[in-house]
Amino acid sequence: MTMTTTNPGPLRDIRVLELGQLLAGPFCGQLLGDMGADVIKVEPPVTGDPMRDWGQGSEKVQWEVIARNKRSVSANLRVPEGQALVKKLIAHADVVIENFKPGTMEKWGLGPDVLLAEKPGLIIARMSGYGQTGPYSDRAGFGGIGEAMGGWRYIVGEPDRAPSRMGISIGDTLTATYGCMGVLAALHERERTGRGQVIDAALYESVLQVMEGLVPEYDRTGYIRERSGSVLKGIAPSNVYKCKNGEFMIGANKDSLWKRLATAMGRPELGDDPRYATHLARGENQDELDDLINQWTRTLTVDEVDALMIEHSIPAGRVYRAPDMLADPHFQAREAIIEVETERFGPLKMQSSFPKLSATPGSVRRPAPSKVGQHNAEVYGELLGLGEAELAQMAEQGVI
């Protein structure tokens, strides 16, 4: 599916000023923009957001995803003239997103106390490593540090090796997602009261939120989760298994599902075997059970195992890479991946907006801005009434 402009989205009457850089702040802006918000991204003059040069491969295209549905203006927030200019823009915004080190916005005269005093209905989403309060709040923090402190890194990887990381910056995107959730809740509250508020989203706490029973397990029983490789300790069978021509994920970690898998394997008697019949028994014999399943899957192709899992209604699936996603008919039917006509690279496939709303779905309405300050004349003219001469003078002075 190619980019469409037919879906204005549920946030079409909301204007967002995005002041952050790299991942957490900009991903929050992407989520809101995909849902229809008018996102104005403020970038440093000339250099822009470092995200413009991030990504893997010979051409850096990650910017095309995270900056879609945004208009770019440039402003030097390190000089008083740039700060005053952005303050004027904020007067026309519903939401401000920032992910600078705590205290930076206050240093620039753009702290919540100042902004909310002038515009009580403003919503300010602040993303940082450790939050805006507490003894660590003034420390520098990146997503990986939040993943480590929040408990994620320690439990990921093989038990005899150093902690592993995901191949994506999950700490940043989790924080952005919680920041977006906070913005939506704050917009609803503003409908009732007219008041804005501050959303304080810390990297480490965002990771902590998805740690399931890690803390109460220790508090109640003293149990500390350890790295367990490709499995979740005690949850079996749930693993990636070797086939003749690849790997396949099977999740039959429920008594009834295990019985179905045993039947699919041609060994229905294993369904009632005391070593595997119950959840606890399978957990105690997890390694043995995985070996048994691997012996079976190695005799079949991925297609053959897949067909058996479908026939017996067992949760299972192929381990996908990007080429597999692009070729899959389910991705195509749900338009999970769309093609956007970008300014720098032409047609480019990327993930669609999500989640899917039935009445007011989000969409990619405009490609990522290819130039820093690409919409200076449009935005500064539209909102602040600044003309060409004034903008040229500010550009010469290094303000924009």
Image (cartoon, rainbow, N blue to C red):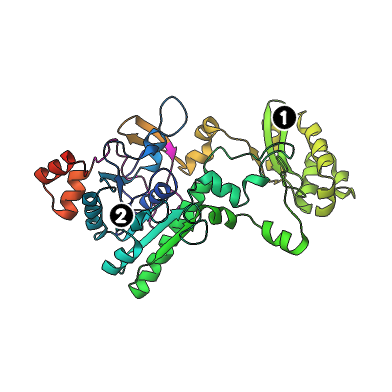
Residue at 48% across, 44% down: 334
Which disc number belongs to residue 108?
A: 2
Q: Amino acid at mark 1?
A: Cys
Q: Is residue 372 magenta?
A: yes
Q: Local crowd at mark 1 within 10 Å, few (<14), some, or many (≥20)?
A: many
Q: Where residue 132 sits: x, y (%)? A: 45, 59
Q: Is residue 120 magenta?
A: no
The span picked out in magenta is 350-374
Q: Quadrant of the C terminus?
A: top left
| Quadrant containing the N terminus in the rendered view | top left
- Disc on the earlier residue, 2 or 1: 2
Q: Nearer the viewer, residue 332 or 245?
A: 245
The residue depicted at 40 percent of the width and 40 percent of the height is 65
Q: Is residue 4 left or right of residue 56?
A: left
Label ID, residue 243: 1
Nearer to us in this view, 366 or 179: 179
